[in-house]
Structure formats: structure tokens, C-alpha cells
Amino acid sequence: MTTTPRTWVVGETVTAALMNTEIRDQFNSFFGAWTTYTPTWTGTSSNPSVGNGNLIGRYLKVGRTVTVHVNLVPGSTSTYGAGNYNFTLPATAANSGCTYMGNAHLLGGARWGGQWLVSPNATQAGPTFPAGTADTRVALMSPTAPETLAAGAQLRMTVTYEAAS
């Protein structure tokens, strides 16, 4: 992961170790492997539980730009809570006055295309999908919208946003 570059001092002796840290390692971090993390899945009224399902996140942070991907596959013992869903982000979003929009894709009984929205200063974000087959307005995802979530479904979300630091 990139770090803040050092401030060089006049007359300082530049060593191979300094060059490796300040140039090679910084440059390599732009092309490094993504970092995995375990997002927290919450509902606004009561929290769901992954149970024997799978919830994994991974991200790449270059400077203050974060690209994150979250994949949820509920299992037979997953519970779905109540209210609108949110998933924690790997870094707090900047308070830049804009909302970042990424993609959300729910593969359940049907395929649903939606958005993953990151608000200014957010630590978590919720996917939006059409409210249902008869209502194509977008609404935050819940246990029953856009369809009833069940074992074997898959929710995939990806977004790029500016981190606060």
C-alpha cells in the first residue's frame, strides 16, 4: 500500500534502502495484489447473519483512491434481518460533497442490475435495485427487495471512491 513520501533533506546521502522504500516499493504497490477484508453486513432494523454462507471483500488503495469489491453468497443457515442493507467499506469515504456510484448485481431467482452508493464521509454503503418487477424505481436492498433473498443467491458489488485519508 502506498505511504506518504518522505521529505528529503539537502546534503542527505541517498542509499539503496531509501531508494527501494521511496521509489520501488511505492511503484510496486500500484500493481500489487488486492487486500482482503471481511465486510460487516447490517440491516437498518435488525442485522442479518451470514451463517454458513460466504461474505468476502477485497480492495486496492492507491493514494486516496479505493476500489472495493464485495461478494455475498447466503447459505442454508443465513438469516436476513430486517430493513435496508449496508456493507462496511475498507476505508472511510472523503467528505468531498459527492456520492460515488458503483455497480451492484444480484443473482437470485432473477438477475437484477443496480448501484452501490457511497455517500460523503461514509463508513458503509448500501446497494440499490429496482423496488420490484412492477416498480422500476430504485430502492435500497432489503431482505425482500428486489426479491426475497435465499440460499445460493449471489450479491456482487464494486465501487471506486475517494478515501478520507
Image (spheres, grey):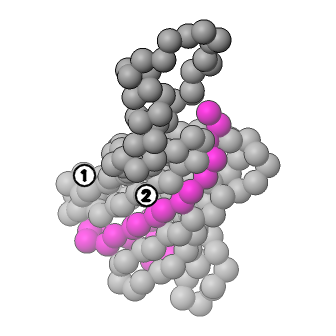
What is the CA distance from the residue labelled 2 to the residue labelled 1?
A: 20 Å
Up the image or down, 131 lies above or below 34; here it is: below
Residue at position x 32%, y 72% in the image: 153
Is 90 drawn above or below residue 8 in the view shown?
Answer: below
Image marks 2 and 1: residues in contact by CB distance under 8 Å: no
Q: Residue 33: horizontal and vertical position, in percent?
A: 33, 48
Evaluate whether residue 126 shows in this view: no
Using residue 108 as the reference point, say whether residue 5 is left or right of it.
right
Q: Which residues are magenta?
A: 143-165
Q: Residue at x 20, y 54 (%)?
A: 52
Q: Examine the image and state in which quarter residue 35 appears.
A: top left
The mark that comes first in sequence, 2 or 1, is 1
Q: Is residue 30 above or below residue 74?
A: above
Image location of residue 112, percent across then percent down: 47, 80
Say which residue label 2 marks: 69
Q: Of 130 and 97, which appears nearest the observer?
A: 97
Q: In front here: 96 or 32?
A: 32
Secondary structure of the residue carrying tag 2 is: strand
Q: Quadrant of the C terminus?
A: top right
Decide whether the magenta segment is chiefly helix, strand or loop.
loop
What residue is disc 1 on? 51
Residue 106 location in percent, x, y? 42, 74
Amino acid type of the residue tagged 2 in the rendering = His
